[in-house]
Amino acid sequence: MPMTSSRGKALAGTVTVPGDKSISHRALMFGLLTVGETRITGLLEGEDVINTAKACRALGARIERTGPGAWTVHGVGVGGLVQSAEALDFGNSGTGCRLMMGVVGCHPIRATFDGDASLRKRPMRRALDPLELFGVRVVAQGEGGRLPITIEGPRDAVPVVYESPVASAQVKSAVLLAGLNAPGVTSVIEKEATRDHTERMLSHFGASVTVTPHGAHGRRIDLVGQPELKPAPVVVPADPSSAAFPLVAAAIVPGSDVTITGVMMNTLRTGLITTLIEMGAAIEQLNPRIESGEDIADLRVRGSRLTGVDVPAHRAPSMIDEYPILAVAAAFAHGTTRMRGLHELRVKESDRLAAVADGLAAAGVDYAIDGDDLIVEGTGRAPGGGTVATHMDHRIAMSFLVMGLATDQPMSVDDTGFIVTSFPDFIPLMRRLGADFA
Ligand code: S3P
């Protein structure tokens, strides 16, 4: 369904955004890999995560929803997965698909992975390459290593030391999850530290995992394989990648004053907040606390005069999903914002670099792409008036709906249907803050 957003009054109020998507996928998968009952609260009930829950069921878990965001998983344990007669369908989700390839990889079963038209375009060799080193066989794959893909796990997996050529938490996680069912120690070396939810959850469920610094920005992770995971409750904190939308909306709509409660502040996820503060956004972190091993805080943000900044490439992993909404903030800043090293944006739910550029053009904003860098020329205001093609990408839809709250003329997006993959109540939540979406 298309939708139009228009400039109106200042945004105001206190909201809670849904549970973190990365942690929600992992909580279900760890539940599957644990014998006994895993209780999850605050689970994101978006389509991506629901597809992961279905796949966990197909692989042997008993999963029940006991209330809003409250789920229990009775798993089969590391080594205990059953073969699914049906293909595992991950819909729009690269995270669900690639992580589950790791979960399944070192089990001696066959499994077929599939997804929607967007996921069928995305590269999967980045997960398959390391899995083959464990002894996993790729039985069938689409052209260029695309979905649908069938893999078969080895009887006796061998552990792997893998230096990932891409800064990707999904690849790192696929290797670690596969290493769970290999004997000995599996190691991943990453040049740039990426989100560490898998490592944290491995320790939380009782696996032996050590993390050591590697080079200027990297890490080495060593995991002892074939542990018996112990059930542990998971409390999912609010997703900083979803908080990003009301956060930027409040920063760009003059006079706004919005508080977003209980947002995860893991420093491998907070690159957007760092950048917005550098741009001059009035963001306060209130009531900082630790819940379930993650730092969280309430974020109060007010309408602010933003200034263009230079965003270093090494910050990209800590805000990889936030560049579309940062580009929107940059359009309303005064001066040039240069976002460096965005090559990974080309392989997200859409080619986000192209989709963002087209959206900025539709809004009449000056920008340039220079290699892997996106340069936005902010003038403090943006004309708007265009329609943005969302290309099955939830974050493109939400970013440009937010943009229309501050452009001179309304902005439209062609399709809001994919917002349910990550933030099902985005539209009512934004309306509660005063957003004019029609
Ligand atoms: C995720 C990792 C990132 C991110 C995605 C979630 C994860 O992908 O874009 O939304 O949960 O591990 P990459 O690992 O491909 O960068």
Image: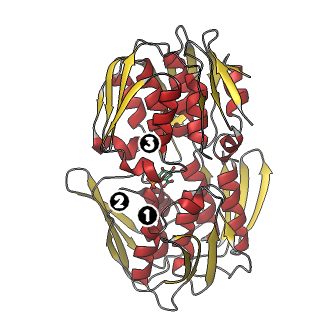
Question: Label 1 amino acid?
Answer: Val
Question: Label 2 amino acid?
Answer: Val
Image depth: mark 3 or mark 2 in front: 3
Q: Return the disc, 1 or 2, that comes first in the chain's sequence.
A: 2
Which residue is at 49% across, 13% downward?
303
Q: Position of residue 297 (x, y in %)?
A: 50, 31
The residue under label 1 is 171
Q: Residues within 10 Å of mark 3 (few under 14, many from 20)?
A: many
Quarter of the image containing the C terminus?
A: top right
Q: Is mark 1 within 8 Å of ligand 1?
A: yes
* Marking on residue 437: none
The residue under label 3 is 353
Question: Is disc 1 placed on a helix, strand or loop?
Answer: helix
Q: Would you say residue 41 is visible in this rendering?
A: yes
Alpha carbons under labels 3 and 1: distance apart: 21 Å
Q: Residues within 10 Å of mark 2 (few under 14, many from 20)?
A: some
Q: Is mark 2 within 8 Å of ligand 1?
A: yes
Question: Label 3 amino acid?
Answer: Leu
Q: Is residue 372 above or below residue 226?
A: above
Alpha carbons under labels 1 and 2: distance apart: 8 Å
Q: List the single residue furthest toward the left.
A: 215
Q: Is residue 51 above or below residue 10?
A: below
Q: Position of residue 332 (x, y in %)?
A: 44, 18
